[in-house]
Amino acid sequence: GEKRVDLVPFATHAEGVRYALQGNLDEAIARFHEADHGLTYINAGLGIFKLQNRLMLAETLRAAGREKEADKLVAEVRSVNKAMVAEFEEDGVETLGLGR
């Protein structure tokens, strides 16, 4: 039979974005972590989404003052996709626009 994609991590990621934009960083971080655990590198599309989720998690960790955790996560993403991290850094390490 056809293999189906579990959509729960995508919904959990969306909740993380919503919480981050509302300023509820702790809930956002929890949701991004939860989404990350549900995502794999099994195919290119899912892998790219997993990396994007991790970069948004890193941005949220930075906004929460958790620089070391964010730096470690960005280094992990860099080890998989240097170009994606370079673009993220060129954009000022902001996708969500959380600033500080």
Image (cartoon, rainbow, N blue to C red):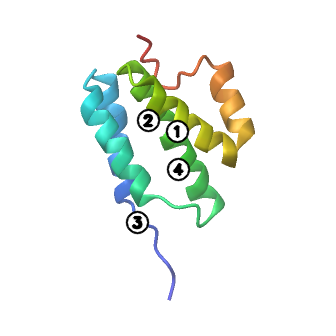
Q: Which residue is mark 3?
A: 6
Q: Is residue 14 above or below residue 18?
A: below
Q: Which residue is mark 2?
A: 57
Identify which residue is drawn at 57% across, 22% down: 93
Identify which residue is drawn at 35% across, 21% down: 64
Mark found first going from the N terminus, 1 or 3:
3
Is there a contact, CB below 8 Å, between mark 2 and mark 3? no
Q: Tag 4: Cα neighbours inside 10 Å, few (<14), some, or many (≥20)? A: many
Q: Amino acid at mark 1?
A: Leu
Identify which residue is drawn at 29% across, 41% down: 30
Q: Is residue 67 above or below residue 45?
A: above
In the displayed structure image, the side of residue 22 where residue 59 appears, left or right: right
Q: Which residue is mark 1?
A: 73
Mark 4: secondary structure: helix
- Which is in the foreground here, disc 2 or disc 3? 2
Mark 3: secondary structure: loop
Residue 73, position in %: x, y? Answer: 52, 38
Residue 48, position in %: x, y? Answer: 61, 50
How far apart are labels 1 and 4 at the CA level? 12 Å
How far apart are labels 1 and 2 at the CA level? 8 Å
Mark 1: secondary structure: helix
Q: Amino acid at mark 4?
A: Lys
Give 83 or 96, whichever is nearer the viewer.
Answer: 83
How far apart are labels 1 and 3 at the CA level? 24 Å
Mark found first going from the N terminus, 1 or 4:
4
Q: Which residue is mark 4?
A: 50
How far apart are labels 2 and 4 at the CA level? 10 Å
Is there a contact, CB below 8 Å, between mark 1 and mark 2? yes
Residue 28, position in %: x, y? Answer: 31, 34
Residue furthest to the front in view is 68
Q: Amino acid at mark 2?
A: Leu
